Image (tube, rainbow, N blue to C red):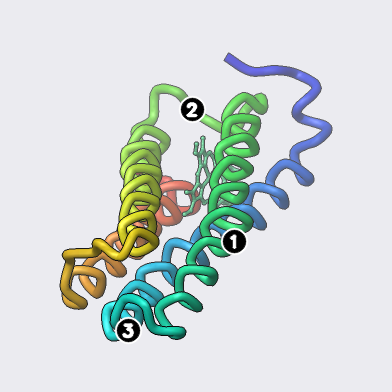
Amino acid sequence: MSIAFLAHLYPWTKALHIIAVIAWMAGLLYLPRLFVYHCDAPPGTQTSELFKVMEFRLYKYIMTPAMLATFLFGILLALTPGLVDWHAGWFYIKLAAVIPMAGVHGMMSRWRKDFLADRNRHPQKFFRIMNEVPTVLMLIAVIMVVVQPF
Ligand code: HEM
């Protein structure tokens, strides 16, 4: 399961994949930090309205395009001849970390909309814990693709 001409594009596909991953991770790690601070800003205040704008811009203009680019270039890499041994386990474990990461992205979209409508009910501690989830998934994804232990 591979497409021959992708071999010529490999350095570019990989560079773009890594760039997209960095931007996506930056958003996945920073947006919950904004939620933590937003919890301290009562609805209707200028600070709360400012957080809404920051959250919107980060989510819409950085995180979502970066996630789509990560998937696009990741799939192109997976289709590049010789990169993925489909009988080895590492690629599937990487996918098992990446798919929940997209799920976390979707949940952050919901929490962002809750803050936008002034109806967030989660405490700061919840967002602090949620901050760690993408970190753990990222560790698994990177170790699988670089070390390929299985
Ligand atoms: C649909 C999602 C994804 C797919 C299909 C995918 C697939 C791949 C493939 C096939 C490679 C090439 C491996 C090689 O060159 O030997 C790669 C490289 C890489 N991926 Fe992903 N990936 C995805 C998402 C992610 C995510 C979410 C992260 C990190 C959080 C990530 C981190 C990396 C890194 C750091 C490399 C470079 C590894 C190296 O230089 O050897 N990928 N990816």
- Find numbered disc 1 in the image and state the secondary structure of the residue it sits on: helix
Neighbourhood count class around disc 1 (C-alpha, 10 Å): few under 14, some 14–19, many 20 upward: some
Label 1 CB sits under 8 Å from any ligand 1 atom? no
**Number of the front mark, 2 or 1:** 1
Q: On the image, numbered disc 3 is attached to which residue?
A: 41
**Number of the front mark, 3 or 2:** 3
Q: On the image, numbered disc 2 is attached to which residue?
A: 85
The quadrant of the image that shows the N terminus is top right
Disc 3 to disc 2, how far (Cα)?
50 Å
Tell me, yes or no, if residue 150 can be seen here: no
Tell me whether circle 3 and circle 1 mark residues in contact (CB < 8 Å): no
What amino acid type is highlighted by mark number 2?
Asp
Query: Residue 146, image x and y in percent?
Result: 49, 53
What amino acid type is highlighted by mark number 1?
Ala
What amino acid type is highlighted by mark number 3?
Ala
Q: Which of 104 and 16 is in front in this view?
A: 104
Q: Quadrant of residue 23?
A: bottom right
Label 2 CB sits under 8 Å from any ligand 1 atom? no
Extreme-front residue of the structure:
44
Q: On the image, numbered disc 1 is attached to which residue?
A: 23
Q: Is residue 39 above or below residue 133?
A: below
Tell me, yes or no, if residue 91 can be seen here: yes
Q: Nearer the viewer, residue 20 or 112?
A: 112
Label located before the other in sequence (3 or 1): 1
Query: Residue 55, image x and y in percent?
Result: 48, 66
Q: Residue at 48% across / 27% down in the picture? A: 85
Q: Residue at 52% across / 67% down in the picture? A: 26
The quadrant of the image that shows the C terminus is top left
Label located before the other in sequence (3 or 2): 3
Where ligand 1 lies, by image quadrant?
top right
Q: Residue at 38% across / 30% down in the picture? A: 88
- Find numbered disc 3 in the image and state the secondary structure of the residue it sits on: loop
